[in-house]
Image (cartoon, rainbow, N blue to C red):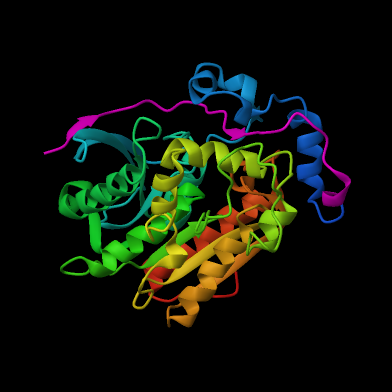
Amino acid sequence: MATITKTEETTVIHPCTSAAGSLIPQKYLGGLDTEWNELWTKFGKEVIEAHLVTIEEFRQFPERYSFTYPVWAGPEVHHVQDYQIPVSDPEGSITCRVYTPSGPGPFPVHINFHGGGWVLGGLKSEAAWCRSICNKSSLIVIDVDYRLAPEHPFPIAIYDCWAAVQWAQANSGELNIDRTSISIGGLSSGGLITAVLAHFARDCSPPLHLKLQLMIVPATDMRYVPLSINSPEPLTARNCAYPSAIFCSEVPWSPLARESWFLNYYIGTDPAARAQILSDWRMTPVLSPCLKGLAPAHIVTAEFDVERDEGEYYGQLLREAGNQVTVKRYAGVPHAFAHYNHPTRGLSKSREFIRDTAWLLSQVHHTGHRDDSI
């Protein structure tokens, strides 16, 4: 039986890890969201480049290397409770934070896997979104604090999150969950975890029939990311299949070097081991040997994001395999746009994202159908 630890509500400042310290290059200004341009120009341009320091240095002094802008901690919800659940390989425990709406239940549940390149992030990363979804969609939302690299490298995060899904199922009575109405989702690295767990859900016995897999700016194919953050060979159509990765490789807020920094901590820098891991579909979902029969998917992408095209390509592969798929690209915004969701400051596109996903999750859980127009 899980042990229960109650936590108090706190106001949160959400970081957007930056690899910047520079003005926005001219080639990006044409289609860039004006609100994001304003935020970056005012708050982001002086930030020290995160990928030039070690993860230990970053964790000790995150304020030096993060574009930190005061965003919304999220609304009050009826009940918040933390549970410690056991995980294995290696053995340990992780925290699952359970947000419960008011009402008698049992409630549908959405299980969230935060972003942060498998290296950063935690229960504060998407708290505002989790709280908003809990209230707006009348869902239990479970936020999973999976273990991070480099202490816990690939594929530990994936199996921690799968353990959380299984735990939610097994403890549905205690948690007041309708175990016939489960969805999963995550942002960036959490989006990759979501893609993999949709396969696990299909293939387990008996199968877990998910209502939705929600992939937000997901990493689905990082084979183009160089080992060195100072790679002498730039990305071109010859060595990269994704135009967004080429075009956005030098965006100051989330450049290719930042992708390298994360990936090196998660899968290591040994060339042979790295090549083996990147050829594993659990690291590169576009290589999955079977994409048929997966849960309905909604994929969110951002226009000014290195990972935009790989996410949309994965959606194309899912659709070609016969799955129900919707994709929405948010124009003019960066990879982490979803974090800037303050009700009066931040980005309008982030607040639009909250409205869209709350509406979608309400539909799939409460009406049994979905509106593909978002």
Q: Position of residue 347 (x, y in %)?
A: 70, 45
Q: Which residue is drawn at 64% across and 47% down?
A: 337
Q: Which quadrant holds residue 143?
A: top left
Q: Residue at x 57, y 62 (%)?
A: 310
Q: Main secondary structure of the magenta part?
A: loop
> Which of 123 and 51 lies nearest the eye of the viewer?
51
Q: Which quadrant holds residue 256?
A: top right
Q: Does the magenta stretch include residue 26?
A: yes
> Which of 72 and 146 lies nearest the eye of the viewer?
146
Please indicate, yes or no, whether residue 303 appears anywhere in the rendered image.
no
Q: Where is residue 106 in the image (x, y as percent from the top left)?
A: 25, 57
Q: Residue furthest front?
A: 272
Q: Does the magenta stretch include residue 222?
A: no
Point out the stretch of residues depicted in magenta. Answer: 1-29
> Which of 299 and 234 lies nearest the eye of the viewer?
234
Question: Where, quadrant-wise, is the N terminus in this rendering?
Answer: top left
Q: Is residue 190 above or below residue 367?
A: above
Q: Position of residue 136 (x, y in %)?
A: 48, 54
> Which of 293 and 260 lies nearest the eye of the viewer?
260
